[in-house]
Image: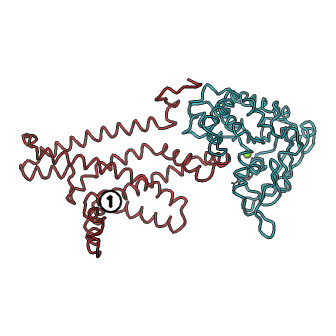
C-alpha cells in the first residue's frame, strides 16, 4: 500500500505548480462572474479561497476540473496546458475530450452536497472511478479503496449505502472517493457547509491530516480559523476579482479583506 | 355451483394453455416494453429534435387511445394489410405475422413503452444533478454516467411505479381473447359456450388472476426491497472471503 501512497506525490521534488490559471474570465449570460482571475497553486501546498457568497468562488474552483468552461484565459493543470478550442476572437468554445478525461483523473473534487452515488455502497462509490476511468482491476481498486476508507475512518462501513450514513460520514466517504484516484490536486467546495455543526470537526480533521501529508489542495471555505491554520496561500475573491492574496497572515491583515474576515476571526 | 367440468381434460388443457399464454405475454411485454421505455425516455430527454418529437407523438397517441382499439388496429388493420404484400406468405416471418400472440405482444410492448417511458423520463429528470456531475467530475464518459449512474438511479426512484404498471399490464391481457388468442378469458369463454355455465368459469379465472397478481406483487416487492441502496447495507448472499464483515 505504501507504493500507491507514494504514487499520490509523483512530483514532490519538482517545483512546477499544480495549477497555473491566467486571466480567467467567465460569464453566465450577461453576468460576468470571473473578471480576469489569475492563480497559482504550488505543488504540495494548500490554497484556500474565501469571499462572500456569489463572489465566484465555486465557479473558479469548478474551472480547475473544467466542470465550468472559462470563456477566456489560460489554464495549466498538472503540467498540462489545457487545449481550449477558440474562435477567431480568442473566445473559448470547446475542449479536447480526451484531455478532459485525463485531467479529471488527476484532479478530483469534494462537493458541498457530497454527491455520493446512492445506489452504490461506500466501497462501490470509492472504486467506481478507479475501475472505470483508470482501468484498475476490481481487486486493485478495492485494495486502494479500503486503504483510503481506512484513512478517513470509514473502513468499517464499506458495505453501507450512503443514505444510511450521517452527513459527516458521507463527506468522509466523498473524500476517500476523491483520494482513491490518487490525484495531483484535490478540490473542495465548502466541504463542511452542508453539515450539522457537531459534524464539522470530523471532516475538518480529515482535511487537516491531508494538508499535513503535503497534498496539493485548493479549497473554498467559510471556516476562517481553519483556512488560516492549514493554508499556505489565501485568496480573497470579491465580485469575481482577487482582492487580496498571499499568506493567511498578510491577507487577514489586508484592509480590503479585513471587513469580510473580521466577524469570523 | 357446478364445477364438475373441471375434471374434463379438454377444459383443463384450455385453462393450462390460457394460463401459460398469459404468463408468456406478460413476460415478453414486460421485458420488451421496459427496454422500449428506456429508449423512449432517452429519446425524449437527449434525442435529436426530430426523434424527440416523434417519440412525443408516439407517446401521446398510445396513451391517448384505448388499448383495445390499438389491439384491433394492429391485428385486423396492420395484420390484414400485411397479408396483401406480395410474397409475404412465402417469407420466414409469415407464421409470426399470422399469430395473434405476435400482435398481442406488439400492442402491449408499445403500450408499456409509452406509459413506462414517461415514468422513466420523469424519474431520470428527478435524479439530482449533483450526482451526475460527480460522475463527470471523476472522468466518467457520458455513456458511463448514463449506464452506471443515471439509469440505475432513475430505476431506483420509479421502481414502485413500474411495479404498478406491470400489475396493470397483467390485467390488460384478457383483451387478447378478442383476437382469438387462447388466454384465460378465452378458455373461460369456450367452457361457458359448451357447458352453458356463466359464473363458474369466470370465478375460476378471476381466482387465478388474483393469485397471479398476489405472487407477482410479492416478487416485485422483493425486487424493490433488494434494489441496491434500499437497505442500510449491501446484502451478501454468498459469504465472500477477504476483509470486512
Ligand atoms: N450555472 C449557472 N448559471 C447561471 N448563473 C450562475 C451559475 N452558477 C453560478 N451562477 C452565478 O454566478 C455567481 C457566482 O456564483 P458562485 O461561483 O457559485 O459563487 P460562490 O461560490 O462564491 O457563492 C452567482 O451570482 C451565481 O448566481
Ligand atoms: Mg459556492
Q: Position of residue B216 (x, y in %)?
A: 33, 40
Q: Which chain is displayed in cyan in the rendered image?
A: A
Q: Nearer the viewer, residue A142 or B227?
A: A142
Give the quarter of the image for residue A225: top right
Residue A224 coordinates in the image, percent (x, y): 82, 35
Relative horizontal placement of residue A39, taking residue A94 as reference (left or right): right
- The N terminus of chain A lies in which quarter of the figure? top right
Q: Is residue A74 above or below residue B244?
A: below
Is the residue A21 above or below the residue A198 in the image? Answer: below
- Picture quadrant of residue B46: bottom right
Q: Residue furthest top?
A: B245
Tint applied to chain B in the drawing: red
Mark 1 belongs to which subunit?
A: B
Taking the spot 83% from the left edge, 38% from the top edge, the residue there is A46
Return the x and y of residue A161 as percentages of the image width and height. Answer: 56, 33
Q: Would you say B64 lies left or right of B126 here?
A: left
Amino acid at each position: 500500500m505504501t507504493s500507491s501512497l507514494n504514487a499520490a506525490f509523483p512530483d514532490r521534488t519538482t517545483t512546477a505548480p499544480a495549477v497555473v490559471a491566467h486571466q480567467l474570465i467567465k460569464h453566465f449570460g450577461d453576468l460576468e462572474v470571473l473578471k480576469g482571475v489569475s492563480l497559482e497553486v504550488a505543488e504540495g501546498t494548500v490554497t484556500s479561497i474565501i469571499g462572500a457568497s456569489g463572489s465566484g468562488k465555486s465557479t473558479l474552483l469548478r474551472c480547475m476540473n473544467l466542470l465550468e468552461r472559462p470563456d477566456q484565459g489560460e489554464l495549466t493543470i498538472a503540467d498540462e496546458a489545457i487545449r481550449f478550442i477558440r474562435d477567431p476572437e480568442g473566445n473559448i468554445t470547446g475542449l479536447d475530450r480526451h484531455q478532459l478525461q485525463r485531467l479529471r483523473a488527476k484532479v478530483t473534487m469534494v462537493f458541498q452536497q457530497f454527491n455520493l452515488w446512492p445506489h452504490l455502497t461506500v466501497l462501490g462509490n470509492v472504486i467506481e472511478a478507479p475501475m472505470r476511468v483508470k482501468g484498475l482491476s476490481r481487486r486493485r481498486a478495492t485494495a486502494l479503496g479500503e486503504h483510503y476508507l481506512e484513512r478517513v475512518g470509514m473502513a468499517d462501513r464499506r458495505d453501507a449505502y450512503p443514505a444510511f450514513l450521517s452527513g459527516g460520514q458521507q463527506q468522509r466517504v466523498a473524500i476517500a472517493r476523491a483520494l482513491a484516484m490518487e490525484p495531483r490536486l484535490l478540490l473542495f467546495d465548502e466541504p463542511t457547509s452542508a453539515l450539522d455543526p457537531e459534524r464539522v470537526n470530523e471532516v475538518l480533521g480529515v482535511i487537516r491530516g491531508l494538508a499535513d501529508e503535503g497534498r496539493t489542495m485548493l479549497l473554498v471555505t467559510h471556516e476562517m480559523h481553519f483556512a488560516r491554520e492549514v493554508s499556505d496561500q489565501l485568496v480573497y475573491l470579491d465580485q469575481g476579482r482577487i482582492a487580496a492574496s498571499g499568506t493567511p497572515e498578510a491577507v487577514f491583515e489586508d484592509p480590503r479583506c479585513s471587513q469580510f474576515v473580521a466577524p469570523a476571526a | 355451483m357446478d364445477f364438475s367440468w373441471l375434471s374434463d381434460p379438454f377444459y383443463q388443457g384450455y385453462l393450462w394453455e390460457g394460463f401459460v399464454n398469459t404468463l408468456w405475454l406478460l413476460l415478453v411485454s414486460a421485458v420488451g416494453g421496459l427496454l422500449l421505455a428506456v429508449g423512449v425516455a432517452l429519446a425524449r430527454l437527449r434525442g435529436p429534435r426530430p426523434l424527440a418529437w416523434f417519440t412525443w407523438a408516439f407517446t401521446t397517441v398510445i396513451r391517448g387511445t384505448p388499448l383495445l382499439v390499438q389491439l384491433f388496429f394492429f391485428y385486423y388493420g396492420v395484420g390484414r394489410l400485411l397479408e396483401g404484400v406480395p410474397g409475404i406468405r412465402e417469407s420466414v416471418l409469415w407464421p409470426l405475422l399470422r399469430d395473434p400472440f405476435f400482435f398481442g405482444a406488439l400492442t402491449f410492448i408499445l403500450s408499456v413503452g409509452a406509459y413506462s417511458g414517461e415514468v422513466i423520463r420523469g424519474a431520470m429528470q428527478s435524479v439530482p444533478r449533483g450526482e451526475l456531475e460527480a460522475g463527470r467530475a471523476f472522468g466518467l464518459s457520458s455513456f458511463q454516467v448514463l449506464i452506471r449512474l443515471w439509469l440505475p438511479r432513475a430505476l431506483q426512484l420509479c421502481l414502485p411505479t413500474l411495479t404498478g404498471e406491470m400489475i396493470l399490464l397483467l390485467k390488460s391481457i384478457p383483451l387478447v381473447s378478442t383476437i382469438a388468442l387462447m388466454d384465460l378469458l378465452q378458455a373461460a369463454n369456450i367452457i361457458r359456450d359448451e357447458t352453458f355455465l356463466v359464473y363458474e368459469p369466470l370465478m375460476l379465472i378471476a381466482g387465478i388472476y388474483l393469485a397471479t397478481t398476489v405472487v407477482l406483487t410479492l416478487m416485485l416487492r422483493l425486487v424493490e426491497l433488494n434494489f441496491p441502496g434500499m437497505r442500510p447495507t449491501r446484502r451478501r448472499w454468498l459469504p465472500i472471503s477477504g476483509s470486512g464483515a
